[in-house]
Image: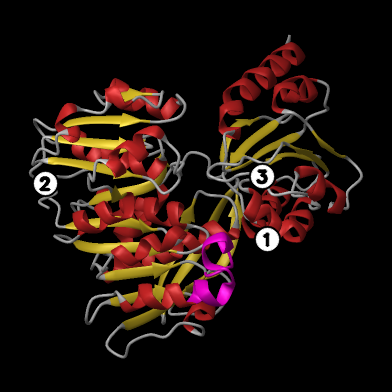
């Protein structure tokens, strides 16, 4: 299929963060009609509609474009693996024998004509990808970027440039999606166990990362951490560099200090040092993400002083340690953390910034299978809070697993102040709490509470100031 010469593209699950970036990519093409289905209306789907993408929210075969049903040449159907396999439209298209492409397949086809930089890893993909895209954009290196979150610099999950020969993509390990990519440069942030509903165990997941590394083009480049190098099978023709924020590596952070809530580091590339690099994101894990991005920018030949200047203007990504309120009385931060390691990094970063404040966390577990596989890890990480409010598990694509509930996590959490709250009661519960630092955490639909919580806390602040 010629994925560029299209007149109609239909998306099943258009509101997903990865799907919507591809929808925006095709919507930018002249004379290409982009249509989609999603289960619920969200802030992102409303934005897509405002950009001219037609979206419906009922499983309605009649709203599938006629050109798709008739299998006209120049049509493409893209679906997300998160779509329920009993979805009426999905079943109809399958029964009609219409070719359905996974999001990852389409992304793989799009990237074939580009110099591809792929960012993989259990944590940090979105932040690292968006930092790289920002550096290149600021340094006048034409690039396209498909991001797994909304960049605050671009206000989008897609950076487009018609003159680009470089594409930056997140290489998602879920469902082995990243095996559709053949990168020129790959960066792997971490290989912690996750998606065990797909892989079964960590060894199988590591085998998939081996396959991903094997997809790197001949004489390509791998940038990763030493602990990843130790477990990966890397071809001899692949040049490998390491990076770290805390240990010796080819690219490492030294002389790390915090001033006015910002990290400053010296970036040491085997003795070539760039001093006082400002990284305006909290948490040593974000310093590490920035060091990885720095390494890729250097690999592309960008001057160190340009990289340093670009990092200073990087704003972050929505729902990646996004601060909504920061006053002396109340701080409110929202984060996408949904794995025990991510929760630990986020909470420790908050504790580092606000050591004398009470930290209240609201966590919505994501997936029954992930909760089952990591319940002890969740309990350990969430016990770093002073107070915990748990929402019910967000099921996404899954059906319930007997005995796997938020109450199970709560029973293992060691702090005294903990509760499980129904979503409809959440705002009322928060209203009764003494909030000093509040975190909302999770990858489900907890983001729908961000604006209402922000408004409630702002009203509270205004009353105090009256």
Where disc 1 sits, the SS reads helix
The picture places residue 456, in percent across and down from the top left corner, at 68, 18
Residue at the spot of label 2: 4
- Is 68 included in the stretch rendered in magenta? no
Q: Which mark is residue 373?
A: 1
Q: Which residue appears farthest toward the top when viewing the image?
A: 466
Whether residue 194 appears in magenta in the rendering, the answer is yes
Q: Earlier in the sequence, mark 1 or mark 2?
A: 2
Q: Which residue is mark 3?
A: 400
Q: Which residues are magenta?
A: 191-206
Does the image show residue 264?
Answer: no
How far apart, in angstroms, are the residues tagged by discs 3 and 2?
Answer: 40 Å
Residue at 67 percent across and 29 percent down: it is: 327
CA separation in Å, label 1 and label 3: 14 Å
Which badge, 1 or 3, comes first in the chain's sequence? 1
- Relative depth, front residue between 44 and 332: 44
3D distance between C-alphas at marks 1 and 2: 41 Å
Q: Quadrant of residue 375?
A: bottom right
Tell me the quarter of the picture where residue 247 sits.
bottom right
Crowding at dot 3, Cα within 10 Å, few <14 / some 14-19 / many 20+, comes out as: few
Q: Are marks 1 and 3 in contact (CB under 8 Å)?
A: no
Circles 1 and 2: CB atoms closer than 8 Å? no
The number of callouts visible is 3
Query: Is 175 positioned to the left or the right of 31 in the image?
Result: right
Residue drawn at (57%, 34%), measured in percent from left and top? 445
Disc 2, SS: loop
| Percent of width and height locating residue 241 | 39, 79
């Amino acid at each position: 299929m010629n994925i560029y010469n299209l007149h109609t593209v239909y998306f099943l699950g258009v509101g997903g963060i990865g799907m919507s970036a591809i929808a925006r990519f095709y919507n930018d093409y002249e004379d290409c009609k982009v249509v989609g289905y999603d289960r619920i209306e969200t802030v992102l789907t409303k934005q897509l509609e405002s950009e001219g993408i037609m979206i419906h929210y009922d499983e309605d075969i009649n709203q599938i474009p006629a050109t798709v049903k008739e299998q006209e040449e120049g049509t493409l159907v893209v679906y997300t693996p998160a779509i329920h396999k009993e979805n009426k439209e999905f079943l109809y298209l399958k029964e009609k024998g219409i070719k359905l492409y996974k999001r990852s397949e389409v992304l793989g086809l799009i990237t074939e004509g580009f110099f591809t930089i792929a960012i993989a890893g259990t944590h940090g993909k979105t932040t690292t990808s968006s930092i790289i895209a920002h550096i290149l954009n600021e340094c006048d290196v034409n690039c396209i970027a498909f991001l797994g979150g909304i960049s605050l610099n671009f206000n989008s999950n897609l950076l487009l440039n018609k003159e680009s020969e470089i594409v930056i993509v997140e290489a998602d390990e879920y469902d082995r999606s990243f095996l559709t990519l053949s990168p020129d440069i790959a960066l792997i942030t971490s290989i912690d166990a996750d998606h065990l509903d797909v892989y079964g165990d960590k060894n199988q997941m590591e085998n998939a990362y081996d396959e991903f590394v094997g997809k790197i083009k001949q004489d390509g480049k791998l940038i990763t951490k030493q602990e990843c190098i130790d477990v990966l099978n890397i071809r001899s023709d692949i040049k490998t560099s390491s990076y770290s924020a805390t240990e010796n590596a080819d690219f490492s952070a030294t002389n790390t200090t915090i001033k006015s809530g910002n990290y400053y580091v010296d970036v040491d590339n085997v003795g070539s040092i760039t001093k006082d690099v400002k990284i305006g994101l909290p948490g040593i894990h974000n310093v590490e993400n920035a060091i990885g991005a720095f390494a890729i920018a250097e690999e592309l030949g960008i001057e160190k002083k340009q990289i340093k200047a670009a990092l200073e203007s990087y704003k972050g990504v929505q729902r990646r340690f996004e601060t909504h309120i920061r006053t002396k009385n109340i701080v409110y931060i929202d984060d996408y953390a949904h794995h025990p390691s991510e929760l630990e990094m986020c909470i420790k970063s908050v504790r580092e910034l606000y050591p004398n404040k009470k930290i209240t966390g609201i966590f919505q577990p994501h997936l029954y299978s992930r909760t089952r596989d990591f319940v002890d890890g969740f309990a350990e990480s969430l016990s770093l809070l002073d107070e915990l409010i748990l929402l019910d598990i967000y099921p996404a694509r899954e059906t319930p697993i007997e005995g796997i509930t938020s109450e199970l996590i709560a029973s293992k959490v060691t702090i005294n102040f903990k509760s499980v709250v129904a979503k409809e009661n959440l705002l009322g519960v928060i209203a009764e709490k003494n909030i000093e630092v509040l975190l909302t955490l999770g990858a489900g639909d907890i983001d729908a509470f961000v604006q209402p919580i922000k408004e409630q806390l702002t009203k509270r602040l205004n009353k105090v100031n009256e």
